[in-house]
Image (cartoon, helix red, strand yellow):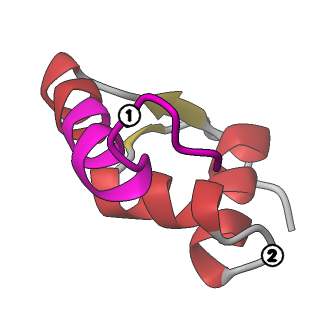
Amino acid sequence: MKCDIKMKILVDTNILISAILFPGSKPSKALLKVSEEHEMVLCEQNLTEFREVVKCKVMPPYRPGLTY
């Protein structure tokens, strides 16, 4: 059921990361629903936190000569 009222919804960094890492998960489905039915909002603080988490936890450190 679609809502006629569009809300601005601030997406939590944990939801964003989980949705990206685990397609088809509940966070992923929630994010899709928000993007389809409402206006998704990301603030600078969330984007900064996202970059830090991806840099430190998701992406392995670069090591010359190491094959990934």
Per the rendered image, the range of residues in magenta is 51-68
- The picture places residue 7, in percent across and down from the top left corner, at 49, 38
Locate the N terminus by quadrant.
bottom right
17 part of magenta stretch: no
Is 52 on the left-hand or right-hand side of 16? Answer: left
Q: Who comes first in sequence, dot 1 or dot 2? A: 2
Tell me the quarter of the picture where residue 50 sits.
top left
Q: Where does label 2 land, which residue? A: 24
Residue at position x 73%, y 57% from top? 33
Q: Where does label 1 land, which residue? A: 62
Q: Classify 20 as above or below 39.
A: below
Residue at position x 19%, y 17% from top? 44
Residue at position x 13%, y 27% from top? 45
Compute the Cα span from label 1 to label 2.
29 Å
Tell me the quarter of the picture where residue 26 sits.
bottom right
Is 35 on the left-hand or right-hand side of 53? Answer: right
Tell me if residue 4 can be seen: no
Q: Classify 52 as above or below 11.
A: above
Q: Amino acid at mark 2?
A: Gly
Tell me if residue 18 can be seen: yes
Is 56 on the left-hand or right-hand side of 1? Answer: left
Question: Furthest-front residue in view?
Answer: 65
- The picture places residue 41, in percent across and down from the top left corner, at 41, 28
61 part of magenta stretch: yes
Residue at position x 51%, y 33% from top? 65
Q: Amino acid at mark 1?
A: Tyr
